[in-house]
């Protein structure tokens, strides 16, 4: 890695799955406001629904998600009861046309920690309350260690057609250091079960920067993963934040690669996946030629939200579960992270939303500019400003804010056109930060760029 890139690689910057980012959310945001946004949606609004399941069978030491390992399944069963209550309450507030949920996503945690009965109950509650659109995407995240042939068939019969596996790395020494043992053969078998069951899309998550990883080991993992032909592969850098995620203290700092090692691993994975027919998508996604994400990336319709890169063009995101974040044209609304606090709000028949932000017209304009840059690696800021009815002068300081990135060769500014070279896509977040008027560089607030 060129020495002039080190300062950018080690900079803590937001992931920009939203703008403003969650750091800017108000901590005393009224849940009634979220209800007003929901009730104000037009009857024909295209909807996306996210359901957060904060439970896992076992805690992986690298994990940065909002999740826990319950003492028994009863806790998960009670959580589902509250989820169903909140879904029904929200559906009654919405009161719009049924059948316009084009995307349903179960995230976690590990959604398949729930048994089939409870997963089906949640799908039914959403379908009854909001209505799943014919041919829509119904997706969930899963642990391949718990997937059987029969369960794959059951999930398919429920309507699920896309699934994501956390693979991370196939090297046993790495898996031992992160408390996630799963052989290549196990993942391959789970992949076969899904294909047999008729799943239209299978996604793998890989990671770099994990303890014990080397350039050679990540290259092997990328080759093995690509050999199983998942439709999409996401590659994330491990964020070591033991002061925030206490279980990460189980990872020895001395086992972690430095910035040069992380950069070499990330670039090696991209090179390997490209050689196996995977197109580089945005910052950190890869997809095969036939995948709709590849087509969306090429025709400029790809989007970015809390689930990462997506083809979801819904008008509103309704979120259920502890810590889940919903998105409306007016702003963002996040439920209480603590499951007890979250359930108490639902017990009282009120919104569990406790954090959020009302966005301004300029926020929404900057959000689109950041999203297009993150998706397309280029953006015309004058066109974005005009589309929002704002003067392009709002970006008059962009040249000054981008000057270090331009000098380092990770971005260019020609008139109103901002471009990040494809070979510098790892630094997209650094360049996006120049559009972010809320951003204040501070250590340990966000994940490092590389």
Image (cartoon, rainbow, N blue to C red):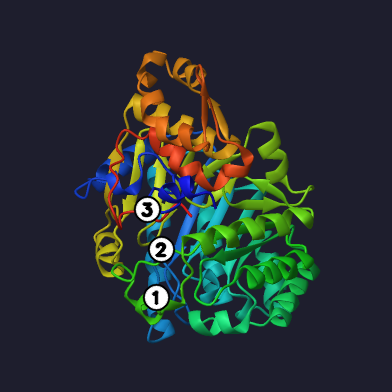
Q: Does the CB distance between marks 1 and 2 fall below 8 Å?
A: no
Q: Quadrant of residue 215?
A: bottom right
CA gap between label 2 and label 3 equals: 10 Å
Residue drawn where x is 67% and y is 47% of the image: 280
Q: Does the CB distance between marks 3 and 1 fall below 8 Å?
A: no
Residue 391 is at least partly visible in this image: yes
CA gap between label 1 and label 2 equals: 38 Å
> Where is mark 1, residue-wise?
253
Horizontally, residue 187 falls left or right of residue 337, namely right
Horizontally, residue 220 falls left or right of residue 46, namely right
CA gap between label 3 and label 1 equals: 46 Å
Residue 160 is at least partly visible in this image: no
Task: List x then y, in percent, for residue 204.
Answer: 64, 64
Task: List x then y, in percent, for residue 38.
Answer: 38, 40
**Which comes sooner in the sequence, label 1 or label 2?**
2
Q: Is residue 135 above or below residue 247?
A: above
**Which comes sooner in the sequence, label 3 or label 1?**
3
Q: Does the CB distance between marks 2 and 3 fall below 8 Å?
A: no
Q: Quadrant of residue 372?
A: top right
Horizontally, residue 360 falls left or right of residue 383, namely left
Q: Give the numbered dot on residue 89.
A: 3
| SS under mark 1 | helix
| SS under mark 2 | helix
Classify mark 3: residues with Cα within 10 Å, few (<14), some (14-19) or many (20+). Answer: some
> Where is mark 2, residue-wise?
83
Residue drawn where x is 69% and y is 32% of the image: 299
Q: Nearer the viewer, mark 3 or mark 1?
A: 1
Q: Quadrant of residue 70?
A: bottom left
| SS under mark 3 | helix
**Which comes sooner in the sequence, label 2 or label 3?**
2
Classify mark 2: residues with Cα within 10 Å, few (<14), some (14-19) or many (20+). Answer: many
């Amino acid at each position: 890695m060129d020495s002039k890139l080190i300062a950018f690689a080690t900079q803590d910057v937001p992931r920009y799955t939203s703008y403003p980012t969650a750091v800017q959310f108000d901590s005393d945001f009224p849940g009634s406001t979220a209800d007003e946004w929901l009730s104000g949606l037009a009857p024909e609004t295209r909807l996306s629904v996210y359901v957060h399941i904060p439970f896992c069978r076992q805690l992986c030491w690298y994990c940065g998600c909002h999740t826990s390992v319950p003492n028994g399944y009863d806790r998960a069963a009670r959580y589902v009861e509250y989820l169903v209550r909140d879904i029904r309450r929200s559906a009654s507030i919405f009161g719009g046309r049924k059948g316009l949920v084009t995307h349903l996503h179960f995230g976690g945690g590990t959604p398949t920690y729930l048994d089939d009965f409870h997963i089906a109950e949640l799908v039914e509650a959403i379908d009854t309350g909001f209505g799943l659109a014919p041919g829509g995407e119904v997706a969930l995240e899963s642990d391949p260690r718990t997937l059987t042939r029969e369960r794959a068939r059951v999930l398919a019969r429920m309507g699920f057609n896309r699934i994501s596996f956390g693979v991370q790395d196939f090297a046993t020494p790495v898996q031992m250091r992160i408390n996630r043992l799963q052989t290549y053969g196990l993942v391959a078998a789970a992949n076969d079960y899904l294909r047999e069951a008729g799943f239209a899309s299978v996604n793998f998550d890989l990671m770099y920067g994990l303890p014990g990883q080397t350039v050679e080991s990540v290259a092997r993992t990328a080759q093995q993963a690509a050999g199983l032909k998942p439709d999409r592969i996401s590659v994330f850098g491990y964020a070591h934040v033991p002061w925030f995620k206490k279980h990460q203290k189980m990872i020895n700092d001395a086992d972690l690669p430095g910035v040069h090692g992380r950069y070499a691993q990330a670039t090696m994975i991209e090179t390997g996946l490209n050689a196996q027919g995977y197109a580089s998508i945005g910052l950190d996604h890869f997809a095969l030629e036939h995948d709709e994400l590849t087509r969306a990336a090429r025709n400029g319709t790809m989007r970015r939200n809390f689930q990462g890169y997506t083809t979801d063009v819904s008008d509103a995101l309704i979120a259920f579960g502890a810590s889940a974040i919903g998105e409306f044209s007016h702003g963002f609304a996040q439920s209480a992270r603590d499951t007890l606090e979250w359930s108490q709000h639902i017990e009282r028949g009120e919104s569990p939303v406790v954090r959020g932000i009302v966005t301004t017209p300029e926020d929404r304009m900057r959000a689109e500019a950041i999203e297009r840059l993150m998706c397309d690696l280029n953006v015309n800021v004058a066109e974005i400003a005009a589309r929002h009815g704002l003067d392009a002068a709002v970006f008059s300081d962009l040249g000054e804010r981008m000057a270090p990135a331009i000098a380092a060769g990770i971005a260019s500014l020609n008139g109103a056109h901002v471009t990040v070279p494809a070979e510098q896509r790892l630094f997209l977040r650094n360049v996006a930060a120049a559009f972010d008027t809320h951003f204040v560089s501070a250590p340990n607030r966000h994940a490092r760029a590389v």
